Image: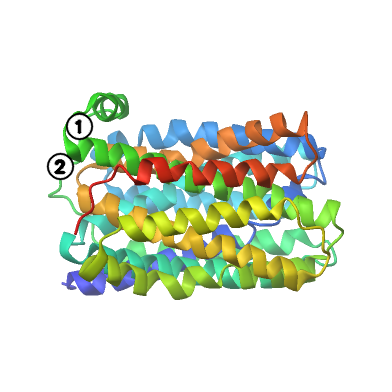
Amino acid sequence: MFSNRTFRLLTYFCGLTMTFSFSFPGYINSTFLEKFINEQRVGLIFAISAFLSIIIISQASRLFRIYGNLKILVVSAILTSLVLTLLSLAESPLVVIPTFIIYYSLSFLVRYALDVYLENISDDENTGLIRGFYLTFLNIAWLVSPLLAGLLVVSGDYWKIYIIAAMSLLPLITIASIFLGEQKKLQYDNNGLWHQIKRLWQGKNQTDRDIRQILIIDFLLNFFYAVMVIYMPLYLHEHLGLGWDKIGLAFTVMLVPFVILGLPLGRTADRWTGEKEILLGGLIISGIATVGLAFITSTNWLVWAGILSTTRIGAASIEVMKETYLFKKISGLDTGLISLSRLVVPFSYLIGPVFASLILLIFDFNYIFFFLGLLVLSGLFFAAKLEDTK
């Protein structure tokens, strides 16, 4: 029988392969869809995908109780791999659009199942370090993906991206099936998702208030990611005319902070400062830098790499701190609360396109980032209310 430390290492590696599969096409999804539908409708496809994801994740606790976490992880990963393969072969919008929606929805379930597994083999004293390690593995995948994808898609061969993404899930499926044991002794949360929402909305004790505030910050961060992932590639490629090779380089530099900051920030929060101070700093840096994006007209990829990496210094700080804070407040059995925390991701992809579409009715494309930065800065109000863990 493996120790928890070994299980964690295996889970980290599963997270790496899972994230590579999702991040590899992550920044080209919107331009791929634009081959089949117009630019204004790309956001709608992401919104529909997010809505289906919300339905799936809202039933996750019930599925775990019936089938077990591990079985859900393996089956959803297999289905995602098959759907990605179909996406690489499809050439008709009648096939591409529904296939993409299914793929995007399943990807959230895979991540959620792996999250629950890791939380069940973690301890609160080292949550920051454990989550820092895990996020570092995930962010390594995000770091290498844009550059590789940008090089492969220069000639318009999008199918290569999706077939590689499908194959990338095979190590996760193999490791989870053979080495990760089902935790049958655990009794997952029987409370429904709406019960958890009601509890947090009405909660008057400090813990409930803290969880409510950190979930709002979680939503703002993922809203930032959703808008950036959908609209920044479109802006750079379609409006400023940057080639995919330059965009890939800029996005790779942009993501470096996620790899180098996760571990030191997680350890710092565990041992010295707590999460609140770092969280506030991250919101200020990311918010101000994102506002600045609206006023940059340069077509030099180095300029974009610099300003985008600044936004991600802030985002990486928020990412590690909100994960550490949340998982110090809950346990792996609180699948209802974990479901709620993971629902903010698809919910942000549901609201993000609506937000951008409303802005485009009045303002030019670049103002999407101006108002996005202001929303990130609004997170300071909620972060200030948190009771620090130190």
Is the Cβ of the residue at disc 1 closer than 8 Å to that at disc 2?
Answer: yes
Q: Which residue is mark 1?
A: 190
- Callout 1: few (<14), some (14-19), or many (20+) C-alpha neighbours within 10 Å? some
Q: Assess disc 2: are there few (<14), some (14-19) or many (≥20) residues with their C-alpha within 10 Å of its C-alpha.
A: few
The CA distance from mark 1 to mark 2 is 8 Å
Measuring from the top left, give residue 180's x and y in whole percent: 28, 64
Secondary structure beneath dot 1 equals: loop
Q: Is residue 49 visible?
A: no
| Colour mapping | rainbow
Q: Residue 181, image x and y in percent?
A: 23, 61
Q: In x, y percent, where is residue 347?
A: 50, 35
Image coordinates of residue 25 in percent, x first then y, are 65, 58
List the residue tagged with mark 2: 187
Q: Which element type, helix, strand or loop, lies under badge 2?
A: loop
Q: Which residue is more in the foreground, 203 or 3?
A: 203
Which residue is nearer to you in this view: 118 or 162? Answer: 118
The answer to whether residue 93 shows anywhere in this view is yes
Three-letter code for the amino acid on which mark 1 is drawn: Asn
